Image (tube, rainbow, N blue to C red):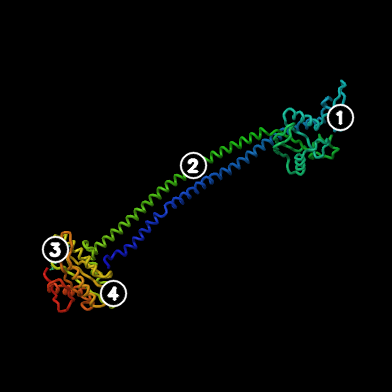
Amino acid sequence: MVRTGLAGCASAEDAAVSETAGSFAAAPGARLLKRFRRYIAVLVAVWVGAALPFMLLGVLEWRQIAADTEALARERGEALFRLIELTREWNARHGGVYVPVTGHLQPNPYLVHPRRDLVANDGGELTMVNPAFMTRQVAELAAERTGVQFRITSLKPIRPDNAGDIWEGDSLRRFERGEMDQRIAFFGEYRLGDTLRPVHRYIAPLHVTPACMSCHVTQGYKVGDIRGGISVTMPAESLLAHRDERQRESVLVLLGSYLLTAGLLHAFVARARRHYLTLEDLARRQESVIVERTRELKLLNEDLRRKAHHDPLTMLPNRLLFNDRLDSALNHARRYERSFALLLVDLDYFKEVNDAYGHATGDELLVDVSRRLESCVREADTVARLGGDEFAILLSETTDAGEADEVARRVVELLGEPYVLTAGMARVSASVGVARYPAHGEDAESLLRHADQAMYAVKLGGRNGWRVYAPTMSAGRPGH
Ligand SMILES: Nc1nc2c(ncn2[C@@H]2O[C@H](COP(=O)(O)OP(=O)(O)OP(=O)(O)O)[C@@H](O)[C@H]2O)c(=O)[nH]1
């Protein structure tokens, strides 16, 4: 039975609203987890991203410290080398110097010179100390006093002990090839005196000068040739300790700066996130309020439409909706050449119920009448309250005339049954007029009028009955 014209369309809108609301409430846990994961990823990116420039700075700083340490070692080695070179130059310019022969200083067996050994006026023995011999003597003294080791070395040594070690030999060959003019190296463990120590070594070439030629001409050298080199080996502990200290400091400074920078970025991200969450929360809340308000508005709208088309007491369609249904039925019937019937139902002496029991009881009876009328028809039919104690029934698609008659008969019979009301028992009867389309009218107005005339005829005939319209019926209505 079609009682409300709006229920159907409301359900689709309801579904849309609840779907929107549902998507809102969908899996808040999953959304939180996703947001948390995104936040953790951002934090990891912040910490890793902030670390990269500091790591790069660290590498550059360490390289600089290593370069500085090497430059310092080079400077130390070069200073000693230049000093020895100067001393040797001084010696060579004098063509060697003479010193007394002692138990510690015996004539140099590798020095071939016509005046290598002399006797002084007082009879004392003197022997010549040439630059190489002097270098060796000074080297021994230096090793003993300072721990610094230097020595003269050559690829073609006159004295076999002057043949260099592997590093020295390699360095001399590189000097000869012109690949470098000095060399520095660090060795973690090097035998210096009696102990193994970390050292840094320096070596630079010795060039043949005119003063050298007196002793070395027999070796085929020319002025400017590389005759060998002097290597200086120095303990490196203090230099390395200084380097390590600088490296530690730089690590601490960079680590501190990194922690500060990353911490600030972290705090900034956390603050931005809180701000974002607050905004997001606000937006969500506003959106849910909008959804809720929309839902309320829809319900309100439906209620208004329902009220505009329904009788508030019985909840049956009112005259407005009934007329609408009648028009629809007419259109349908015309298009498909169908028939239908219209019944007008008016209670008899209803006023007496009101008078006897009061208006509220009258209302109760009207509601009961409505339910009884509804029980007389099919789902597709319409029962409406036209006003007061007057009702209408639209029987859609009645295939034969007997159907409407049968409904009319049932209505009269059912409405005539006693009513058990709050105030007591009551009885009314009903007068029913029937008009059929197309037999008794082809438009709404004539069908209503003819049904009314039929109902009027029942009233005239003593009420409590039903009649089908006949053209012979009077057009007037009883005075009520
Ligand atoms: N309780 C109640 N009474 C109503 C309502 N609407 C109209 N009435 C009353 O219904 C009565 C209708 O009276 P009448 O038109 O004389 O109808 P009747 O008393 O049934 O008489 P007949 O139709 O001539 O048989 C009046 O007393 C109205 O006040 C309503 O909504 N509730």
* Ligand 1 under 8 Å from disc 3 Cβ: yes
Q: Earlier in the sequence, mark 2 or mark 1?
A: 1
For label 2, the SS is helix
- Disc 1 and disc 4: Cα gap in Å? 147 Å
For label 4, the SS is helix
Which residue matches tag 2?
264
Mark 3, other Cα within 10 Å: few <14 / some 14–19 / many ≥20: some
Q: Residue at x 13, y 63 (%)?
A: 353
Which residue matches tag 4?
332
Quadrant holding the N terminus: bottom left
- Disc 2 and disc 3: Cα gap in Å? 86 Å
* Ligand 1 under 8 Å from disc 4 Cβ: no
| View quadrant of ligand 1 | bottom left
Q: Which mark is residue 353?
A: 3
The amino acid beneath tag 3 is Val
Q: Nearer the viewer, mark 3 or mark 1?
A: 3
Q: Earlier in the sequence, mark 2 or mark 3?
A: 2
Mark 4, other Cα within 10 Å: few <14 / some 14–19 / many ≥20: some
Q: Is residue 71 above or below residue 317?
A: above
Q: Earlier in the sequence, mark 1 or mark 4?
A: 1
Which residue matches tag 1?
116
Q: Nearer the viewer, mark 2 or mark 1?
A: 2
Q: Earlier in the sequence, mark 3 or mark 1?
A: 1
Q: Is residue 369 left or right of residue 75?
A: left
- Disc 4 and disc 2: Cα gap in Å? 77 Å
- Disc 2 and disc 1: Cα gap in Å? 79 Å
* Residue 294, quarter of picture: bottom left
The amino acid beneath tag 4 is His
The x and y percentages for residue 334 are: 27, 77
